[in-house]
Structures are given as structure tokens and as C-alpha cells.
Image (cartoon, helix red, strand yellow):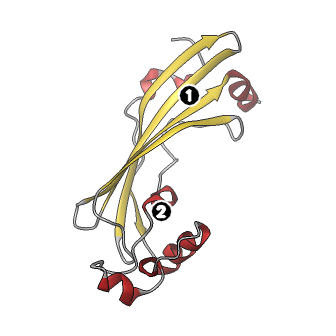
Amino acid sequence: MEGHMLFQEEKIGQRSQPITHEVERGAIRRFARALGLTSAIHQDVASAQAAGFRDLVAPPTFVVTLLPWQIPGLTLPSAGVLHGEQEFWWGEPICAGDQIQVTGWVEDVKTRSGKTGRMHIITIASEGMHQDEQPAFRARAVLIVTEEAENASRG
């Protein structure tokens, strides 16, 4: 395969070291407010517990704050990376006080050439597990690195 060594198929399967995140009430409250969510389950512990949660419950998209982007051998340019798509699957809800262990990996790398030049399509997957080893989430992001961005990153 031709192309920058950072985007070769040999990167498939490269995993990050597990990172454990302690989910804090303040982080959940701020994230929910930033999204304009007004449900008391994101702001008030008693309301969250009355609704059957252990503590404040994080909005589903809170997982983006936990995603690992440091995968050994994969260095993305600081500019020019396009976010092609994002998928999430959720397990047990994430609540304040949870310890979520997150690992990320390169799931796929493709290089395409066209009229506008070469591009690398990189699929990065990640998963988060609760402290009791129950799944919290799985995510997949498709990133597109254009030839222009690749060349700029080489300096």
C-alpha cells in the first residue's frame, strides 16, 4: 500500500492503553446544561435516584468526553481531519461515581485516490466498561485525512 506510514493497514488492531475515568457529578451537570437538557436526573441526585439511577445519570452523548484518541502508532494531523460519521451503542447508563475503563483501537484503514487527490479513511473504535465489567458503551468514528492535511502534517 502506498501512502504515509501513519495510515497503513498495519495499524489495524493497534490499541490504546486502558484509561479509567471517574465520572463526576459536576461534569454531568455541565455537559447536560451545555446541551440544554433540563431533566432533573442530570442535575439532582434525589430525582435521579427516584427515577431508578444510582446517582446523576449522564446524557448518552457524554461518552464523547471519555473517548481515547491516543492510539500507539496513529498520529492524526492537527488540522484537516474530517469527521465522516459517528456511531454509538449504549449498555448500562453512566452515572456519577462510576469508574469507566476505556480502550480505543484502529478498526480499519483504507486509502482512496480520486480527482481531488488521495485520502485515508480511518475507522477508530472504542469501548467503555463499568467498574463491574458491564458494558457502558461502544463507539465508532470514521475520520477522513485528506492528502493536503497529510502533507501539511509532514512539515
Task: Decide: is 6 above or below 136.
Answer: above
Q: Marks 1/2: CA distance? A: 29 Å
Check disc 2 and give the amino acid type. Phe
Mark before the other along the chain sequence, 1 or 2: 1
* Residue at 42% over, 61% down: 60
Q: Residue at x 45, y 38 (%)?
A: 124
- Residue 76 location in percent, x, y? 61, 37
Does residue 67 show up? yes
**Residue 140, percent from left and from top:** 43, 41
Residue placed under numbered mark 1 in the picture: 6
- Left or right: residue 33 versus residue 67 is right
Which residue is painted at 40% across and 29% down in the image?
Answer: 12
Q: Are marks 1 and 2 in contact (CB under 8 Å)?
A: no
Name the residue that disc number 2 marks.
62
Please state which of residues 72 and 64 is positioned toward the viewer in this rendering.
64
Image vertical order of residue 45 relative to residue 71, above or below: below
Task: State how many labels appear.
Answer: 2
Element type at mark 2: helix
Quarter of the image that includes the C terminus: top right
Residue 28: percent from left, percent from top: 49, 73
Graded by Cα atoms within 10 Å as few (under 14), some (14 to 19) or many (20 or more), the crowding at tag 2 reads some
Q: Where is residue 50, by image quadrant?
A: bottom left
Residue placed most toward the observer, 78 or 73: 78
Q: In the shown orientation, is residue 95 left or right of residue 52?
A: right
Three-letter amino acid code at the position of disc 1 = Leu
Residue 4 visible in the shown view: no
Residue drawn at 44 percent across, 86 percent down: 44
Label number found at residue 76: none
Vertical placement of 103 versus 150: above or below? below
